[in-house]
């Protein structure tokens, strides 16, 4: 099985729209939405949920007044100052690190796991999909990304599907690290802006650290041809393939409003033609064709 992780470095580059379009071209893939903090691939895929499971994240400490001797060890060790002089834990300040639980001499601190979100196995018109939703302001997004990818990989093996397309999170933080490790290849969708180039470079460095082959796609390239040329020059310097340049086209937005992929909305337009070529180039790269 091969896994293509689609990244952006920053939000707003059109990564999810391209992911959905590629899913319609792949013809029998498994989709994974690893952008658990702001999942939106489901808006285009309209998944029919078959399985729903709670995601248990880190705990919130609470002190049992019947067992607590008020020795002060927890207050001394809590670097977040989450425990007051009355030995009551402030749930907002508590980061769930568990240090107070481990070092309490009376074992008077409870640390029950919390439901931080849910993950799903669904059917879509393009094949199975594994996705998740993290609760508002909840932690452990990297842990949830890892879980979602593991479930997607297992499901692909069970169903005999040899291509997994993962819609990764933006940035280069913990969720992105969890989304990249072990992937066959990463496609970075960037845009011809200063921030787009900067964040693309950070994403490239991250992928190289984990030894994941990188490809680059320039979306909305015609809005700033000079910056697009700069991206191509940087890619050449880094020996990275630029798999395509997609022009700006309002058809992407119109398709999104209708809850459709680009090819379902307008499969014969200029943007569709460019994306077909991009997908063909991706599938012909060394990383995706190597056994």
Image: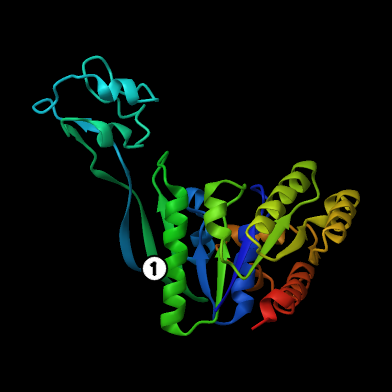
Q: Residue at x 41, y 68 (%)?
A: 151
User: In the rendered view, would you say 106 is above or below 59?
Assistant: above
Q: In this rendered view, identify the residue nearer to me: 179 or 68.
A: 68
Q: Secondary structure at mark 1?
A: strand
Q: Residue at x 50, y 82 (%)?
A: 161
The spot of residue 256 in percent (x, y) is 60, 59
Split into 4 quadrants, where in the image is the N terminus?
Answer: bottom right
Q: How is the image coloured?
A: rainbow
User: In the rendered view, would you say 229 is above or below 2?
Assistant: above
User: In the rendered view, would you say 251 is above or below 2?
Assistant: above
Let me know if residue 74 appears in the view: yes
In this rendering, the count of numbered labels is 1
Residue reaching furthest to the top:
85
Q: In this rendered view, identify the residue nearer to me: 281 or 74.
A: 74
Q: Quadrant of residue 147?
A: bottom left
- Other residues around mark 1 within 10 Å, as few (<14) / some (14–19) / many (≥20): many
Q: Residue at x 39, y 25 (%)?
A: 80
Split into 4 quadrants, where in the image is the C terminus?
Answer: bottom right
Mark 1 sits on what residue? 121
Q: Is 136 on the left-hand or right-hand side of 51? A: right
The spot of residue 41 in percent (x, y) is 53, 60
Residue reaching furthest to the left:
66
The spot of residue 32 in percent (x, y) is 50, 66
Q: Is 281 on the left-hand or right-hand side of 6? A: right
Q: In this rendered view, identify the residue nearer to me: 276 or 232.
A: 232
Let me know if residue 253 appears in the view: no
């Amino acid at each position: 099985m091969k896994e293509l992780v689609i990244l952006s470095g920053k939000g707003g580059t059109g990564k999810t729209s391209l992911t959905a379009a590629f899913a319609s071209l792949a013809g029998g893939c498994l989709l994974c939405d690893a952008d658990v903090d702001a999942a939106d691939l489901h808006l285009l895929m309209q998944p029919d949920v078959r399985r729903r499971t709670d995601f248990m994240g880190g705990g919130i400490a609470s002190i049992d007044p019947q067992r607590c001797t008020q020795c002060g060890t927890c207050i001394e060790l809590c670097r977040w100052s989450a425990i007051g002089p009355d030995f009551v834990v402030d749930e907002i300040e508590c980061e769930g690190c568990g240090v107070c639980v481990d070092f309490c001499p009376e074992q008077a601190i409870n640390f029950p796991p919390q439901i931080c979100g849910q993950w799903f196995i669904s059917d879509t018109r393009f094949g199975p999909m594994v996705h998740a939703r993290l609760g508002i302001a909840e932690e452990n997004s990297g842990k949830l990304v890892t879980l979602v990818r593991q479930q997607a990989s297992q499901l692909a093996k069970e169903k005999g599907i040899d291509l997994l397309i993962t819609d990764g999170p933006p940035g280069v933080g913990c969720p992105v690290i969890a989304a990249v490790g072990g992937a066959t290849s990463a496609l970075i969708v960037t845009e011809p802006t200063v921030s787009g180039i900067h964040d693309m470079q950070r994403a490239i460095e991250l992928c190289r650290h984990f030894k994941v082959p990188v490809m680059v796609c320039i979306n909305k390239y015609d809005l700033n041809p000079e910056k697009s040329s700069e991206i191509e020059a940087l890619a050449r310097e880094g020996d990275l393939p630029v798999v395509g340049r997609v022009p700006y086209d309002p058809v992407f937005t119109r398709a999104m409003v209708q809850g459709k992929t680009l090819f379902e909305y307008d499969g014969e337009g200029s943007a569709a033609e460019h994306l077909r070529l991009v997908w063909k180039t991706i599938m012909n790269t060394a990383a995706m064709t190597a056994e």
